[in-house]
């Protein structure tokens, strides 16, 4: 049977024809473009959300303001040792082009998605069919984690693209002795080191080892241009690490030991200088993986396993599965995880799910509904508005402060820093000092989240409530 008939919703026959019609190609391309355009349009619609997104956006803004392209700054006098700078470089460059706004800082993540989709389409076409690549790109772009993360200010999208480039390069050189893509694989590893650090080498190296072990293809290692590839890897990645340690001594100890050992093996690790530990039961990453691939992961469940179990014999399906399982097993031993930890292997999960959808003869109506479900929900939330007008952002608070401040009164956040307030104020907002002696006789504005109560014998009588906005209270104070 022709695939166009299947994807148009007509009842499939008992036979299956993998040939791709022009009509079906146009449908899949059109659907993918629609998803990407929706995500592009949404980049600037809702404000930056605390904590992680606004924090990373403010760090990129500070990189531009301070013209310091070596060390990302957590605060004006505090270097950020938690992540390498690749994501911040991209966000800062976007700010230089478009200005400090939501669109600018979110755009790089969407560009990483475009790059991932391009690789998936190429890979699927080379190994099976253009249809497989297009459908994998659609699954990636419209899955719950993909649609959210590839339009947010995060460091994970950079790692996702880097790992996909590395594993694709490995596949090409192992199976086809493709030297160009072998070098691009080393570029992917270098980007991974600059995006997240040594975790990129682990997520690439473990699956490569098990693949070679399973298929006994050790001889294929001789196809890899080790000398030139490693030279390229170190030329691209090593200089920043050397300069970063020279510029801010102590970076290596915190980053390599703290972030890559204690964070994952020490429950409730208290050494995090920039946030809080996210404590979960062990193996919770598997639940995150299920949630990350919604709604697509549900579709094969409702079909007999015999319809798609033959895919296990497909080499690319096996390789993708090994990559996914290696990451999930690796993070199963850690209790300090986030759901974005699944993102590096989400393109491989998308490839596997797309292959399953082809095997179970999913109709185009099903694919259309599944791919547009999450975008439609986000659009509804943006139209309704109040879902984003919460304590998770301070955009309206800063707008009110900018319009009503009389002179140069400073703006403070009560109890803890509010990163979205810092971003939207251009770095003028800061945490209220615990010792108020230095503010005696001064006037200032104070943001108090509704989860806190304004306290203190000196502070509370000196402050007058001016406005309640989006889950926060703005006070005008005179000590």
Image (cartoon, rainbow, N blue to C red):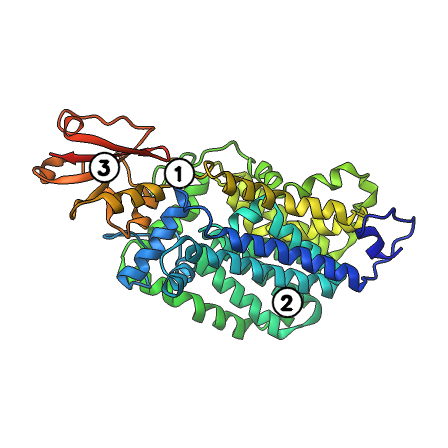
Q: Name the quadrant of the N terminus.
A: bottom right
Could you tell me residue 272's position as x and y percent?
35, 42
Spatial CA distance of label 3 from label 1 is 17 Å
Q: In the rendered image, which quarter is residue 475 located in?
A: top left
In percent of width and height, residue 204 lies at: 57, 56
Q: Quadrant of the C terminus?
A: top left
Of residues 313 and 371, the one nearer the viewer is 371
Contact? badges 3 and 1 (CB < 8 Å): no
Would you say the residues marked 2 and 3 are in contact, meaning their CB atoms lie under 8 Å apart? no
Does label 3 or label 1 sit earlier along the sequence? Answer: 1
Tell me the mark number nearer the camera, choosing from 2 and 3. Answer: 3
Which residue is located at x 52 percent, y 54 percent? 41
Q: How dense is the environment of label 3, judged by Cα within 10 Å: few (below 14), some, or many (20 and up)?
A: many
Residue in front for this viewpoint, 380 or 291: 380
Q: Quadrant of residue 220?
A: bottom right
- 212 vs 465: above or below: below
On the picture, is 324 further left or further right than 229?
right
Q: Which residue is mark 1?
A: 392
Where disc 3 sits, the SS reads strand
Identity of the residue drawn at 67% across and 49% down: 321
Instruction: Using the image, tell me which numbered label, if any, was put on residue 221.
Output: 2
Residue reaching furthest right?
14
Q: Which residue is mark 3?
A: 446
Q: Secondary structure at mark 1?
A: loop
Between marks 2 and 1 in the image, the one whose residue lies nearer the viewer: 1
Residue 335, percent from left and from top: 48, 36
The reply to whether dot 2 and dot 1 touch (C-beta < 8 Å) is no
Q: Earlier in the sequence, mark 2 or mark 1?
A: 2
From the viewer's perspective, tell me whether residue 277 is left or right of residue 333: left
Between discs 2 and 3, the one toward the N terminus: 2
């Amino acid at each position: 049977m022709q695939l166009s008939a299947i994807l148009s919703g007509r009842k499939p026959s008992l036979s299956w024809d993998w040939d791709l019609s022009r009509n079906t190609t146009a449908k899949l391309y059109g659907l993918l473009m629609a998803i990407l355009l929706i995500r592009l349009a949404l980049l600037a619609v809702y404000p930056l959300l605390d904590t992680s997104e606004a924090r990373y956006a403010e760090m990129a803004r500070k990189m531009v303001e301070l013209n310091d392209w070596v060390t990302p700054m957590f605060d004006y006098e505090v270097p950020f040792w938690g992540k390498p700078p690749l994501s911040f470089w991209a966000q800062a460059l976007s700010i230089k082009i478009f200005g400090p706004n939501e669109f600018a800082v979110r755009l790089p993540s969407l560009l990483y998605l475009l790059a991932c989709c391009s690789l998936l389409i190429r890979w699927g076409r080379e190994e099976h069919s253009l249809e497989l690549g297009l459908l994998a790109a659609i699954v990636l772009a419209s899955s719950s984690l993909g649609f959210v993360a590839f339009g947010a200010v995060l460091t994970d999208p950079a790692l996702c693209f880097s790992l996909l480039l590395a594993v694709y390069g490995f596949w090409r050189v192992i199976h086809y002795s493709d030297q160009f893509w072998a070098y691009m694989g080393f570029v992917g590893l270098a980007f991974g080191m600059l995006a997240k650090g040594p975790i990129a080498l682990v997520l690439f190296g473990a699956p490569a080892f098990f693949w070679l072990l399973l298929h006994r293809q050790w001889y294929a290692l001789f196809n890899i241009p080790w000398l030139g590839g490693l030279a390229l890897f170190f030329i691209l990645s090593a200089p920043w690490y050397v300069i970063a340690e020279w510029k801010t001594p102590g970076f290596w100890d915190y980053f390599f030991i703290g972030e890559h050992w204690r964070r994952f093996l020490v429950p409730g690790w208290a050494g995090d200088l920039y946030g809080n530990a996210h404590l979960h039961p062990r193996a919770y990453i598997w639940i995150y993986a299920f949630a990350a691939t919604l709604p697509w992961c549900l579709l094969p469940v409702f079909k007999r396993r015999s319809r798609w179990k033959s895919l296990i014999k497909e080499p690319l399906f096996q390789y993708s599965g090994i990559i996914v399982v290696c990451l999930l097993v690796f993070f199963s031993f850690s209790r300090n995880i986030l759901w974005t930890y699944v993102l590096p292997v989400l393109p491989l999960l998308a490839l596997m799910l797309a292959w399953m959808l082809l095997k179970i003869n999913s109709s185009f109506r099903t694919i259309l509904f599944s791919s547009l479900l999450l975008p439609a929900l986000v659009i509804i939330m943006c139209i309704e508005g109040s879902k984003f007008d919460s304590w998770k952002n301070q955009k309206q608070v800063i707008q009110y402060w900018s319009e009503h401040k009389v002179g140069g009164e400073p703006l403070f956040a009560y109890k803890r820093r509010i990163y979205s307030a810092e971003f939207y104020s251009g770095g003028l907002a800061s945490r209220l000092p615990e010792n108020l002696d230095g503010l005696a006789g001064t006037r200032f504005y104070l943001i108090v989240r509704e989860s806190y109560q304004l306290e203190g014998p000196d502070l509370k009588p000196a402050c007058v409530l001016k406005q309640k906005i989006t889950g926060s209270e703005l006070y005008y104070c005179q000590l």
